Amino acid sequence: MREKRRLGRSIGLVPTMGALHDGHLSLLKASVEENDISVVSIFVNPTQFNNQEDFEKYPLHIEEDLEKLSKNKCDVVFLPDQGEIYRDKTRLKFHFGSLEKVMEGKFRPGHFNGVAIIVSKLFNIIQPDTAYFGQKDLQQFTIIKLLNEQLDFGIKLRCMPIMREPNGLAMSSRNLRLSSAGIETASIIYKIINKSAELLLTGNSISNVKSFVENEFKNSEARLEYFEIVSLIDMKSIRKIKSGEECALCIAAYVEDVRLIDNTLLTL
Ligand code: PAF
């Protein structure tokens, strides 16, 4: 990669954990359009899983992934094994202050430390000009932005829109673990997010919208872990509506023991 850079060719990186879906391919498409060389990394990163079972059950579809990548103009696949990435037990600890005290940080202790370790390693190994991430992991993107700034990686970061199944369910590798009934149940997540956005825009208070969400989940097979309306700048919960403020409505919920997240952006 150093050689390619030296020759003045731009490099786009799409970091993934495999089990690729159209969401990942939309990141690759953007990279192919904007760079000379597109690299996709596939690595199921153990340090970002706070739940061993989730790690063990994470879907692996390497053959299909490689086929999708070659059909979609990926130039380089980086497919390291655990030993190459983690030669020794890593001792690094990243702290992101209040950014990691809410939502994913709160419910998945250590998750963002693991994300920051692997993303720093990938940035150093691949040395991309631009890196592409999905908006579904909005808090992750905010953390990576901070990491990029604070460690002076100098990489351009792109946050690409969420891709959805026909029923509205946000695309995720974890959807592969759902039955067809589960996929139907999970469509409630996006419906509730959309309805909540509508309620906020038509003058309902934050506490009313929160009660609405809790009630909707009580009447469904899905189990709500959190629903938060947060500022786009610092991911802190918004308590009072300020006209013009940019926010995100974020949900994490379990369907058939599979943890799913989703969000939408909104200007109040
Ligand atoms: O978003 C993901 O798939 C992962 O968190 C990432 C960024 C590839 C790091 O392992």
Image (cartoon, grey):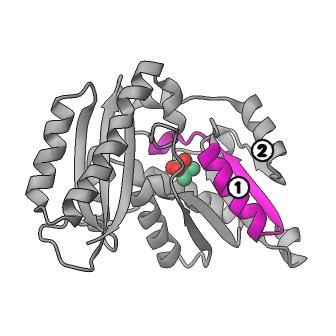
Position of 245 with respect to 190 (left or right) is left
For residue 34, above or below residue 57: below
State the quadrant of the N terminus: bottom right
Quarter of the figure with residue 53:
top left
Please check the rendered image and state whether residue 45 is part of the magenta-colored stretch, yes or no: yes
The residue sitting at 84% across, 68% down in the picture is: 36
Q: Which mark is residue 28?
A: 1
- Is 185 displayed left or right of 75 in the figure? left
Q: Is 262 situated above or below 236? A: above
Residue 251 horizontal/vertical position (percent): 30, 47
CB within 8 Å, label 1 to label 2: yes
Residue 228, given in percent of the width and then of the height, sits at 23, 55
Decide: is 117 above or below 44: below
Q: Compute the Cα span from label 1 to label 2.
A: 8 Å
> Which stretch is magenta?
22-48
Structural crowding at the residue carrying mark 1, measured as other residues with C-alpha within 10 Å and reported as few (<14), some (14–19) or many (≥20): many
Q: Position of residue 74 (x, y in %)?
A: 80, 52
